[in-house]
Amino acid sequence: VKEVIIEISEKMLGVTAVMKNDKLVGIVTDGDIRRMLKKYENINGLKAKDIMTTNPKTIGADVLTIKALKEMRANSLSQLLAIDGEEYVGVVHLHNLINEGIL
């Protein structure tokens, strides 16, 4: 879990993808981290799979940003994972859309 917390902090997206054998298997958000800290007295030994959300909402890498925004709003999300086929390619974050003047 330490690596997950570091990655979320370094990338400042509030989320990280959980991969297994180069396949996207889930996500861990900053909210998942907060819930974990509240739930467990000792987090030593916990793995990403113990706190991750499986089957995260994704969007095709070639989808227009307006569709990504609609998907975020419809699902009360601040980020979506972008995929190309089955390959994880990155994160579309609401703050990025705002910073780029799309909103």
Image (tube, rainbow, N blue to C red):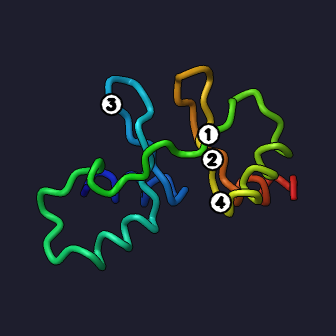
Q: Residue at x 79, y 60 (%)?
A: 98
Q: Residue at x 72, y 55 (%)?
A: 72
Dot 2: what SS?
A: strand
- Calculate the distance from the C-alpha at mark 4 to the C-alpha at mark 2: 7 Å
Which kind of residue does numbered mark 2 sit on? Leu
Please report whichever mark, 1 or 4, sits nearer to the chain's N-terminal start. Answer: 1
Left or right: where does residue 43 sit relative to residue 5?
left
Which kind of residue does numbered mark 1 sit on? Thr
Viewer-proximal residue, 75 or 32? 75
Left or right: where does residue 97 sit relative to residue 35?
right
Q: CB of mark 4 within 8 Å of CB of mark 3? A: no
The residue that mark 2 highlights is 80
The residue that mark 3 highlights is 20
Residue 83: give x, y in percent of width and height: 60, 30
Other-residue count near label 1 (Cα within 10 Å), few / some / many at <14 / 14–19 / ≥20: some
Dot 1: what SS?
A: strand
| Picture quadrant of residue 77 | bottom right
Which kind of residue does numbered mark 4 sit on? Ser
Quadrant in which the N terminus appears:
bottom left
Dot 4: what SS?
A: loop
* Label of residue 3 in the image: none
Which kind of residue does numbered mark 3 sit on? Lys
- Calculate the distance from the C-alpha at mark 1 to the C-alpha at mark 4: 12 Å
Quadrant in which the C terminus appears:
bottom right
Q: CB of mark 1 within 8 Å of CB of mark 2? A: yes
Other-residue count near label 3 (Cα within 10 Å), few / some / many at <14 / 14–19 / ≥20: few
Residue 95: give x, y in percent of width and height: 70, 60
The residue that mark 1 highlights is 58
The residue that mark 4 highlights is 78
Please report whichever mark, 3 or 1, sits nearer to the chain's N-terminal start. Answer: 3
